[in-house]
Amino acid sequence: MAMMRAAVFVEPGRIELVDKVVPDIGPNDALIRITTTTICGTDIHILKGEYPVAQGLTIGHEPVGVIEKLGSAVTGYREGQRVIAGAICPNFNSYAAQDGVASQDGSYLIGSGRCGAHGYKATAGWRFGNLIDGTQADYVLVPDAQGNLAPIPDGLSDEQVLMCPDIMSTGFKGAENAHIRIGDVVAVFAQGPIGLCATAGARLQGAALIIGIDGNDHRLGIAKQMGADVTLNFNNCDVVEEVMKLTGGRGVDASIEALGTQGTFESALRVLKPGGTLSSLGVYSSDLTIPLAAFAAGLGDHKINTALCPGGKERMRRLMNIVASGRADFGALVTHRFALNDIIAAYDLFANQRDGVLKVAITPH
């Protein structure tokens, strides 16, 4: 029986590296030997117990690797081929997926997790490290591989495509959901990895003025590299007041919230023009409230859009095309590198946001 190493959730505050059996695959699956993966902010929510997963589940949802074994029904790929798969890997059979929402399987588990007996745990197409074993391991099983595996173009390194499975797809969806038009003014709240990708996406969508907001000057410097024209440190100014000054009191055409807190959500709403769009990317761990004045008592024609990272091979192909074209360079986001054996140290660094960390590259082999 072949064994592998895997980082598993044990209990809130505790992830361990353990030995697990290499998964068997079914006819529609593929076994991927992981060459590079990473840690996401959502993994930190799991680590802290803010998002519930099963004890012993392998964590992680950002795979870059090589096809080790293909299911009998999977065609058009070959063993030994370098591939990625989206963090979200729907089966594309649900009503939602066939209705054009590539992140959704229509899967909502009743009475699970912290939501209570009558609540819902939104799972949608997110399976890696949520419903099935994830990518922080030597191997991962990719379900519905025909629709989810995307070949890596020749000449692109693991680190160049490492952002595609999740944060690039999520950040770009934030810009797409903001309905940015050529010449728009856009404010992006929080310049962590997803916010930085949203900033780059806003530039690609045609925004004329992008305002990047964070409390970390190092991240604000990288935001400039990603396409921000103006940066604001919320420790040094009243961000809402400054944004309104920059827009002559008009407000921004769109705001993107990329952190998942009441404060950033509320500020993103307050800076919107009448008829503007708030694109929400944050993973929230508590209830949100909408302030009456910021929402114009419901009379402001505002739009609030939420998003889950779109998955599937076509989405991944398009994102890798952006990387290959040189239109966006996410190399600056990989700030630290660890071996899989040292993943607990990587979690400690990333969870506590030390040493200017943005993203860590985890290499099992």
Image (tube, rainbow, N blue to C red):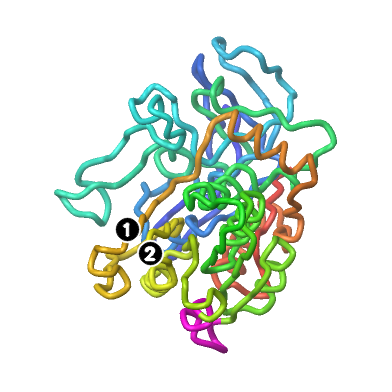
Q: Point out which mark residue 315 bears.
A: none
Residues at marks 2 and 1 touching, judged by CB atoms closer than 8 Å: yes
Secondary-structure class at tag 1: loop
Q: Nearer the viewer, residue 297 or 287?
A: 297
Q: Is residue 88 left or right of residue 324?
A: left
Which of the 4 quarters of the picture holds residue 218? bottom right
Q: Is residue 263 above or below residue 322?
A: below
What is the x, y in percent for residue 53? 37, 49
Can you identify the residue that label 1 sits on? 301
Is residue 6 in sight in this rendering? Answer: no
Is 306 a magenta residue? no
In this view, which residue lies farthest toward the right?
155
In this view, which residue lies farthest toward the left?
118
Q: Is residue 211 above or below residue 124?
A: below
Q: Is residue 69 left or right of residue 127?
A: right
Of the image marks 2 and 1, the number of the one nearer the N terminus: 2
Give the residues in magenta: 234-244
What is the x, y in percent for residue 223? 67, 67
Is 240 a magenta residue? yes
Report, in whole angstroms, how far the alpha carbon at label 2 lies from the one at label 1: 6 Å
Q: Residue at the location (42% across, 60% down)?
A: 276
Which of the 4 quarters of the picture holds residue 227? bottom right
What is the x, y in percent for residue 236? 57, 89
Estimate how packed mark 1 is, as few (under 14), some (14 to 19) or many (20 or more) residues with alpha carbons within 10 Å: few
Can you identify the residue that label 2 sits on? 274
Q: Nearer the viewer, residue 357 or 135?
A: 357
